[in-house]
Image (spheres, helix red, strand yellow):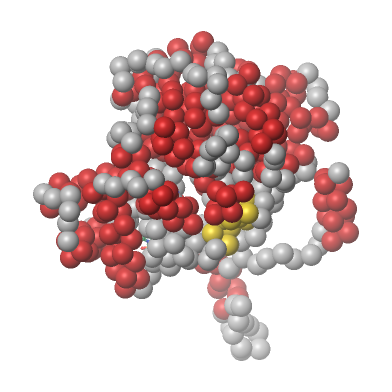
């Protein structure tokens, strides 16, 4: 059992130093500090994400598809993250069947969502919807009954499977409630997880189902340190169940520096179109707009990353999808134009470490093309996908028996005193060096 291996490593080499923390890392959001375990994926600054060793391009190619399908099944990705093997088509179908069987939503969840004002942001509705399903948690019930800790992973797996089965229905319910007068669409139980999600959203183009399969695959996991993943891990480490851990994760995803960037990108471009009075701007006009954003003390949404230092492969695969499916629109042209124009400008500031686009720079433009224009909803779609990764990882955290997270904090006063103690002259008159 892996947890035995981990516990042996810990027993034999627990004192081994893995990393050091600089003052800049402490102040600047703990970038790159290696201090958490995450089994499902690993992010390389230049190559991008690898999920269980597979790059985005490889996942698109190698994961099972529906018969005669072209895009990977997110169900298959979930299997890969959990089992560490690419599933066969039958194994992927097993996950699809499980999620169909577990997808019934308790009535009170709809009532909770319906009680919210219609203008409530979809991410708030989503997070509340997930929390309200917590009444179903098997982990919490069994924990109250005195479950043995060896069973934690199993109860978490059951909650995770139940939750993932329901997530697309809750998301589609919020979409139809908010933007289509509550004209809901019944699930089609013959479809796969992503295909059914596309169906329930009400977008009829078959290529939109293909897009959803790819979209829900590529947004799922980006190792453990990003805010939504880390939040799920942190909250889960208290033995809060999958529902409570996931809703917390979704609240982190809802921040503009994280998953909300996908809606910000589209609204930022629309604003440019409105200001310029054209949706076919020149490169000079786009450059001026980017510079005015920076001069206004705002970020250029969809650009930059805490870890990546090259164009995000998740951006590039969406660009490829648009090319493969011959999707053309002025909005997509603008996205590609920004890809050409923005990096040198961002680089010239001298402070932005990554001038390249991230995943959020592209997704909205393709969704608009298929008629899903309500950009406040986009982060919910990101969230449906992210649920796969963070919950697969939560199952692993329970299987490995990882403990309660509790890093040490210090105050800025402590920090000032510490620096002084390290830099002030010592008794023999020499200054101590801070390394
Ligand atoms: N536009 C303007 N300024 C930017 C920038 C951008 N796209 N990206 C970074 N910067 C700025 C930072 O705000 C920071 O400024 P400061 O020194 O005045 O505080 C400086 O450049 C250095 O930042 P960094 O080390 O390059 O990035 P970071 O690790 O601190 O932040 C991120 C990373 C993503 C928050 C940042 O690049 C950003 O705000 N991007 C725009 C929002 C966005 O697209 N977020 C989505 C990221 C992907 C995701 O999680 N879904």
Instruction: Find the residue positioned furthest to the front.
Output: 68
Regarding ligand 1, which quadrant of the image does it lie in? bottom left
Residue at figure coordinates x 58%, y 62% from the top left: 44
- Residue 378, image x and y in percent? 39, 37
**Which of the 4 image quadrants contains residue 400?**
top right
Residue depicted at x 26% and y 54%: 334
Above or below, 338 relative to 422: above
Q: Residue at x 33, y 36 (%)?
A: 370
53 or 260, which is in the foreground? 53
Tag count? 0
* Direction from residue 340 to residue 130 in the image, left or right: right
Q: Give left or right: position of 411 versus 332.
A: right
Residue at the spot 48% in from the left edge and 66% down from the top edge: 309
The answer to which image quadrant residue 206 occupies is top left
Q: Work out whether residue 13 can be spotted.
A: yes
Name above or below for residue 400 compared with residue 285.
Answer: above
Q: Residue lying farthest bottom?
A: 429
Image coordinates of residue 25 in percent, x first then y, are: 54, 64
Question: Residue 239: horizontal and vertical position, in percent?
Answer: 69, 33
Q: Quadrant of the N terminus?
A: top right
> Residue lying farthest left?
277
Q: Is residue 375 visible?
A: no
Looking at the image, which is closer to me, 413 or 88? Answer: 88
Q: Is residue 61 left or right of residue 158?
A: left
Residue 164 found in image quarter: top right
In the rendered image of this protein, does residue 251 appear above or below residue 309? above
* Residue 272 place in picture, x, y as percent: 19, 51
Residue 218 lies left or right of residue 96; in this view the side is: left
| Quarter of the image where the C terminus is located | bottom right
């Amino acid at each position: 059992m892996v947890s035995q291996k981990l516990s042996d490593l810990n027993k034999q080499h627990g004192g081994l130093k893995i990393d050091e923390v600089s003052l800049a890392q402490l102040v600047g959001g703990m970038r790159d500090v290696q201090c958490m375990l995450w089994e499902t994926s690993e992010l390389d600054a230049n190559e991008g994400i690898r999920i269980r060793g597979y790059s985005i391009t490889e996942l698109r190619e190698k994961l099972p598809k529906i018969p005669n399908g072209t895009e990977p099944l997110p169900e298959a990705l979930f299997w890969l993250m959990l089992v560490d093997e690419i599933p066969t088509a039958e194994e992927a179908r097993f996950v699809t069947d499980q999620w169909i069987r577990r997808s019934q939503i308790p009535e009170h969840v709809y009532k909770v969502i319906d009680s919210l004002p219609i203008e409530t942001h979809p991410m708030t509705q989503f997070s509340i919807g997930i929390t309200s399903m917590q009444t179903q948690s098997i982990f919490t019930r069994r924990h109250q009954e005195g479950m043995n800790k060896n069973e934690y992973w199993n109860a978490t797996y059951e909650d995770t499977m139940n939750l993932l089965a329901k997530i697309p229905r809750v998301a589609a319910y919020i979409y139809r409630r908010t933007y289509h007068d509550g004209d809901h669409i019944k699930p089609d139980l013959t479809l796969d997880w992503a295909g059914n999600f596309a169906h329930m959203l009400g977008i009829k183009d078959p290529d939109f189902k293909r897009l959803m399969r790819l979209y829900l695959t590529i947004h799922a996991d980006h190792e453990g340190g990003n805010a939504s993943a880390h939040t799920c891990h942190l909250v889960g480490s208290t033995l809060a169940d999958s529902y409570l851990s996931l809703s917390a994760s979704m609240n982190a995803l809802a921040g503009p520096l994280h998953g909300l960037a996908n809606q910000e990108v589209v609204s930022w471009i629309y604003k440019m179109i409105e200001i310029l009075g054209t949706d076919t701007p020149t490169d000079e006009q786009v450059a001026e707009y980017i510079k005015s954003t920076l001069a206004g003390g705002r970020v250029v949404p969809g650009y930059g990353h805490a870890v990546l230092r090259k164009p995000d492969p998740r951006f590039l695969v969406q660009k490829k999808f648009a090319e493969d499916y011959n999707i053309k629109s002025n909005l997509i042209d603008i996205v590609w134009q920004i890809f050409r124009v923005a990096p040198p400008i961002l680089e010239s500031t001298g402070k932005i470490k990554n001038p390249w686009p991230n995943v959020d720079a592209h997704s909205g433009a393709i969704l608009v093309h298929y008629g899903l224009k309500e950009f406040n909803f986009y982060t919910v779609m990101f969230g449906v996908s992210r649920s796969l990764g963070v919950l697969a990882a939560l199952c692993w955290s329970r299987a490995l028996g990882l403990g309660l997270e509790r890093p040490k904090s210090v105050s800025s006063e402590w920090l000032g005193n510490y620096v002084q103690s390290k830099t002030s002259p010592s008794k023999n008159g020499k200054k101590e060096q801070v390394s």
